[in-house]
């Protein structure tokens, strides 16, 4: 059985589909880096008129995040290197949910379980999480949006993953995500997608509880 996990809001505490559950990684960025975090958030993540947010192009692999930040950061008063900013961002935005990771470890002991990550990420943070945070030690692969070329809301995302892994109709890979729109898209693609709220959702799921 293939089991997929989202990153933000599932494997990592930080951004969450529910605003009240979010833990901002940049809460002390002004004190630490002398930068106006609100300006970066607005220029990077907010949609402007009919144009998508600047981050969107990074998340689908059309632009490099470093290039986008090189344009944005001076407007927020930052004079350091883009690499230093990214290091700060990625390290502060990598608070792993140890309870969820413990379930992942337990599932990984079963030979018939194949673990994957399905996430919206650009290339640099995906590499950081995979290599430096160490998700590569627990999962077979990471299917992130910039690699796939589509956000998880799009049917093309799931079609690409299905084709790459040879997922056939009726296989119904299990998937845990905190975003209702993503869960709905995955279900339309034939996945057994579950809206994730806490580690209890993993322990009580009928396809997993006998394995844990």
Image (cartoon, rainbow, N blue to C red):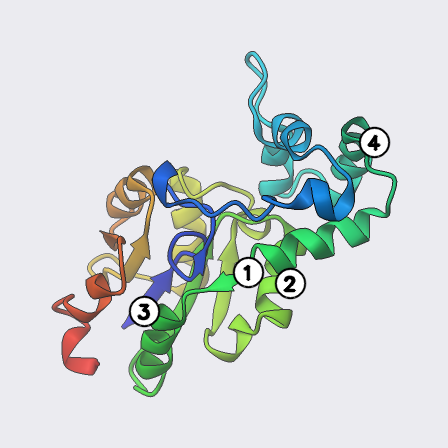
Q: In the rendering, at what x and y percent does residue 199 appear? A: 27, 65
Q: CA distance from mark 1 to mark 3?
A: 25 Å
Q: From mark 3 to mark 2, how far is it between C-alphas?
A: 24 Å
Q: Which residue is mark 4?
A: 74
Mark 4, other Cα within 10 Å: few <14 / some 14–19 / many ≥20: few
Q: Is residue 60 visible?
A: no
Q: Which residue is disc 3 drawn over?
A: 2
Which residue is pictured at 26% across the width and 41% down the height?
Answer: 184
Q: At numbered mark 4, what does the secondary structure look like: helix, strand or loop?
A: helix
Location of mark 1 (residue): 94
Count of all numbered marks drawn on residues in the image: 4
Of labels 1 and 4, earlier in sequence is 4
- Sequence-first tag of 4 and 3: 3
- Is 123 placed left or right of 183 in the picture? right
Dot 4 or dot 2: first in sequence order is 4
- For the point 57% across and 49% down, which residue is it? 25
Does the CB distance between marks 2 and 1 fall below 8 Å? yes
Residue 28: image x %, image y %?
64, 46
Point out which mark residue 128 bears: 2
Observer able to see residue 152 = yes
Q: Which numbered disc, 1 or 3, marks the residue that appears first in the sequence?
A: 3
**Label 3 SS:** strand
């Amino acid at each position: 059985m293939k089991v997929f996990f989202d990153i933000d809001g599932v494997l990592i505490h930080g951004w969450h589909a529910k605003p009240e559950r979010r833990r901002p990684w940049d809460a002390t960025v002004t004190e630490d880096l002398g930068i106006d975090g609100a300006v970066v958030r607005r220029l990077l993540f907010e949609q402007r008129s009919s144009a998508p947010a600047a981050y969107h192009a990074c998340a689908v692999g059309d632009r490099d995040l470093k290039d986008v930040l090189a344009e944005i950061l001076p407007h927020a008063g930052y004079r350091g290197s883009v690499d230093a900013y990214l290091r700060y961002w990625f390290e502060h935005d990598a608070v792993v949910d140890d309870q969820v990771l413990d379930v992942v470890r337990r599932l990984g002991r079963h030979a018939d379980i194949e673990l994957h990550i399905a996430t919206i990420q650009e290339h640099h943070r995906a590499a950081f999480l995979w290599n430096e945070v160490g998700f590569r030690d627990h999962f077979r692969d990471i299917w992130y949006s910039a690699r796939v070329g589509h956000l998880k809301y799009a049917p093309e995302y799931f079609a690409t993953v299905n084709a790459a892994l040879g997922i056939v109709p009726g296989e119904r890979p299990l998937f845990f995500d905190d975003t209702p729109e993503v869960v709905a898209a995955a279900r339309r693609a034939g996945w057994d997608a579950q809206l994730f709220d806490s580690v209890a959702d993993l322990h009580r799921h009928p396809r997993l509880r006998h394995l844990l």
